[in-house]
Image (cartoon, grey):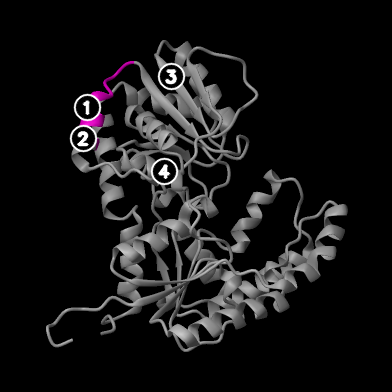
C-alpha cells in the first residue's frame, strides 16, 4: 500500500465443530479465532461442518459399540471428501490468504493452492494414550484409517503447528516430515479474565505464607491424577503444614473434609462462575494437576496468567509449559504422592523462591503462553511479507 501500512491477511477458519462455543475442545478453537481477530485479521468462519454422509456410518459405529469398541467416521475417506468439497467451495468464493484448520481430519482430502496451516494439541498416535482411561478401546479399523489419513494431511500442509516438542518430534519421526514445515508454538489459556501484570504482582504479595492453597482443576479425576493430589495434601497436613485444597470440575468419591473445598462445575459462560474462578486462582499458591496423560495442558497456561506456578508430572507436552524449579514443579512420570509432598513442602519453606517462581510463571504467560503470541507466530512463519 502507498502509505506503507500493512494489511493483515484474510483467514479461513476451519473446524468440524462450532468454534464459536468456548467449551469446544477446551476452548482452544474459540480463543484462536478471537486472537486472529484481535491481530486485525479478517476471519471467515467455516464451521461447523456436518456432511449428511455421516449418517451412513452410524450402523458401523453402533456395531463396534456393541463389540465394546470405539469407532468414529471422522477419518473415513468418503466423509473427509465431502468435508473437503464444502471447504473448497467456500474458499473459491472468499479467496482467503490463509486456511487455518483446527482438526487434521478436516484437511486430508483438501485441494487448494492457498497456504494451509494445520494446528492441534496432539497427534492421533499420541491420542492413543488416552484410551486406557476411557470406556472402550479403539477398533483397528479406526486406528488404521486415522494414522494413514493423518499422514496425508501432514504431507500436504504448508505448516504443521503443535504446542509441544513431543508432538513435533512425533510428526517428524512417525510421518517423516521435514523441519521446514514444522513449528512448535505453545498454546494459551482459555479463561475469560486476563489480569494485568500489576494486578498479578499484587495477587502474589497478598497470598502470604499460611495457610497455603492448592487447586486441582479437571473433569477426569483418574487421568488427571486426583488421587495423587489428595494423598499429597494429606501428607502435607500430617507434617504440620497448613494446606487447603480446592477441587474444581469434578465431584470425587472422597469424604467430607474441612480443609477441602469441592466445586463440581464452573461455567466459562456465566459471569458469576468466571468471577468465582478468578478469585480462587488469585488466592491459589500452586495449581496441582499431576496428569498421567496430557496433550498440552491449557490449565497450566491459565494458572500462569494469574502468577500461579503449576505442579505436574513430565508427560505429553507439559514440559513445554513448566520448567522444574523455575516456573513450577515438574516431577518425572509416575512420581508418587510422597515425592510431590516433599517438593511442595520444600517450596513453601522458601518464600522468596516461591515468589520468584510465581513471577516467572506470569512472565511465561506474557511471552508465549497466550493466544495472540500463538497466532502472531503462525502469521510470521507463513508470510515473509503480509499480503497488501
Q: What residue is at 46 percent from the left and 42 percent from the top?
A: 268
* Picture layout, residue 136 above or below residue 39: above
The dot on residue 300 is 4
The dot on residue 244 is 3
The answer to whether residue 353 is left or right of residue 301 is left
Q: What residue is at 25 percent from the left and 46 percent from the top?
A: 363
Residue marked by disc 2:
201
* Picture layout, residue 277 above or below residue 45: above
Q: Does label 4 or label 2 sit earlier along the sequence?
A: 2
Spatial CA span between label 4 and label 2? 18 Å
Tag 2: Cα neighbours inside 10 Å, few (<14), some, or many (≥20)? some
Q: 151 or 275: nearer the eye?
A: 275
* Picture layout, residue 182 above or below residue 321: below
The dot on residue 205 is 1
Residues under numbered marks 1 and 2 in contact, where contact means CB atoms less than 8 Å apart: yes
Q: Secondary structure at mark 3?
A: strand
Amino acid at each position: 500500500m502507498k502509505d506503507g501500512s500493512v494489511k493483515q491477511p484474510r483467514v479461513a477458519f476451519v473446524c468440524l465443530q462450532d468454534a464459536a462455543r468456548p467449551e469446544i475442545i477446551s476452548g482452544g478453537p474459540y480463543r484462536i479465532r478471537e486472537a486472529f481477530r484481535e491481530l486485525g485479521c479478517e476471519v471467515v468462519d467455516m464451521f461447523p461442518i456436518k456432511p449428511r454422509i455421516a449418517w451412513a456410518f452410524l450402523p458401523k459405529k453402533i456395531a463396534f459399540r456393541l463389540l465394546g469398541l470405539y469407532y468414529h467416521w471422522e477419518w473415513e475417506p468418503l466423509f473427509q471428501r465431502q468435508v473437503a468439497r464444502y471447504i473448497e467451495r467456500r474458499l473459491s468464493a472468499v479467496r482467503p490468504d490463509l486456511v487455518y484448520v483446527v482438526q487434521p481430519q478436516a484437511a486430508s482430502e483438501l485441494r487448494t493452492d492457498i497456504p494451509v496451516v494445520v494446528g492441534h494439541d496432539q497427534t492421533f498416535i499420541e491420542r492413543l494414550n488416552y484410551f486406557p482411561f476411557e470406556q472402550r478401546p479403539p477398533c483397528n479399523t479406526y486406528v488404521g484409517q486415522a494414522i494413514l489419513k493423518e499422514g496425508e494431511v501432514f504431507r500436504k500442509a504448508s505448516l504443521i503447528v503443535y504446542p509441544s516438542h513431543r508432538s513435533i518430534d512425533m510428526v517428524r519421526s512417525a510421518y517423516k516430515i521435514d523441519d521446514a514445515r514444522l513449528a512448535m508454538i505453545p498454546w494459551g489459556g482459555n479463561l475469560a479474565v486476563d489480569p494485568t501484570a500489576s494486578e498479578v504482582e499484587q495477587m502474589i504479595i497478598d497470598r502470604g505464607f499460611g495457610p497455603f492453597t492448592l487447586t486441582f482443576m479437571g473433569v477426569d479425576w483418574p487421568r488427571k491424577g486426583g488421587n495423587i493430589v489428595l494423598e499429597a495434601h494429606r501428607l502435607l497436613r500430617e507434617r504440620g503444614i497448613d494446606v487447603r485444597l480446592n477441587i474444581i470440575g469434578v465431584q470425587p468419591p472422597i469424604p467430607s473434609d474441612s480443609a477441602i473445598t469441592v466445586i463440581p462445575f464452573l461455567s466459562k459462560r456465566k459471569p458469576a462462575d468466571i468471577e468465582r474462578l478468578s478469585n480462587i486462582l488469585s488466592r491459589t499458591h500452586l495449581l496441582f494437576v499431576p496428569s498421567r496423560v496430557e496433550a498440552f495442558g491449557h490449565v497450566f497456561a491459565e494458572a500462569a496468567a494469574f502468577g500461579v506456578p503449576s505442579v505436574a508430572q513430565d508427560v505429553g507436552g507439559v514440559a513445554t509449559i513448566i520448567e522444574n524449579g523455575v516456573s513450577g514443579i515438574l516431577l518425572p512420570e509416575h512420581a508418587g504422592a510422597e515425592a510431590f509432598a516433599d517438593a511442595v513442602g520444600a517450596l513453601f519453606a522458601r518464600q522468596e523462591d516461591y515468589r520468584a517462581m510465581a513471577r516467572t510463571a506470569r512472565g511465561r504467560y506474557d511471552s508465549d503462553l497466550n493466544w495472540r503470541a500463538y497466532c502472531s507466530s503462525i502469521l510470521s512463519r507463513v508470510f515473509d511479507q503480509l499480503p497488501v
